[in-house]
Image: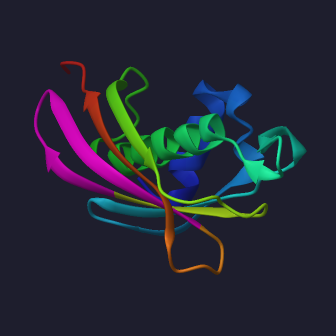
């Protein structure tokens, strides 16, 4: 799938995910770089981006990477998400780099590293497993 096809599909099946806040900067086999615009709803006390917002971005980035490889499969679902918060992200855009490490017939395993835009040190790292329904 192309970046436009993936984003249109995600917007259609998950309109509550604020698809207008998501852009794909780069997409290639087993890899996607996703940009997520944040706003006041993503902040927690202390002026930093909340953990749930970063977890949602990690899950969304992995879903995009997976859809780009297997096509529009709405029922590919997260079976595991483990995240480590590494440092306090600055308010502003977040960048997620998702890589599929293993793509099988029934499971996909990947990792996502999240950055504050313009800062080279990661703010979070996640590993995810997705279940792929039988065709």
- In the picture, measured across the screen, residue 103 lies left or right of residue 40, that is left
Task: Based on the picture, tell me whether residue 72 belongs to the magenta stretch.
Answer: no
Residue at x 11%, y 32% (from the top left corner):
105
Note whether 39 is above or below 29 in the view shown.
above
Q: Nearer the viewer, residue 34 or 29?
A: 34
Q: Name the residue at the left extreme.
A: 104
Residue 125 x, y percent position in the rendering: 40, 54
> How many numbered markers are drawn?
0
Note whether 135 is above or below 100 in the view shown.
above
- In the picture, measured across the screen, residue 45 lies left or right of residue 107, that is right
Q: Name the residue at the front extreme.
A: 46
Residue at x 24%, y 19% (from the top left corner):
133
Task: Based on the picture, tell me whether residue 107 belongs to the magenta stretch.
Answer: yes
Which region of the structure is painted magenta?
A: 99-115
Residue 94 x, y percent position in the rendering: 64, 61
Where on the picture, by quarter, is residue 53?
Answer: top right
Residue at x 62%, y 34% (from the top left corner):
52
Q: How is the image coloured?
A: rainbow
Residue 103 x, y percent position in the rendering: 15, 44
Where on the picture, by quarter, is residue 70?
Answer: top left
Q: Nearer the viewer, residue 60 or 93?
A: 93
Residue 114 x, y percent position in the rendering: 50, 60
- Majority secondary structure of the magenta segment? strand
- In the picture, measured across the screen, residue 130 lies left or right of residue 118, that is left
Note whether 118 is above or below 79 in the view shown.
below
Where on the picture, by quarter, is residue 91?
Answer: bottom right
| Figure quadrant of the C terminus | top left
């Amino acid at each position: 799938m192309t970046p436009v096809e993936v984003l249109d599909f995600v917007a259609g099946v998950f309109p509550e995910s604020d698809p207008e806040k998501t852009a794909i900067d780069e997409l290639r086999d087993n890899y996607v770089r996703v940009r997520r615009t944040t706003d006041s709803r993503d902040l927690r006390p202390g002026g930093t981006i909340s953990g749930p917002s970063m977890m949602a971005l990690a899950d969304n980035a992995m879903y995009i990477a997976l859809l780009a490889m297997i096509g529009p499969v709405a029922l590919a679902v997260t079976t595991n998400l483990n995240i480590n918060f590494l440092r306090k992200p600055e308010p502003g855009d977040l960048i997620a780099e998702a890589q599929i490490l293993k793509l099988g017939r029934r499971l996909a395993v990947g990792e996502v590293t999240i950055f504050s835009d313009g800062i080279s040190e990661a703010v979070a790292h996640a590993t995810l497993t997705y279940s792929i329904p039988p065709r």
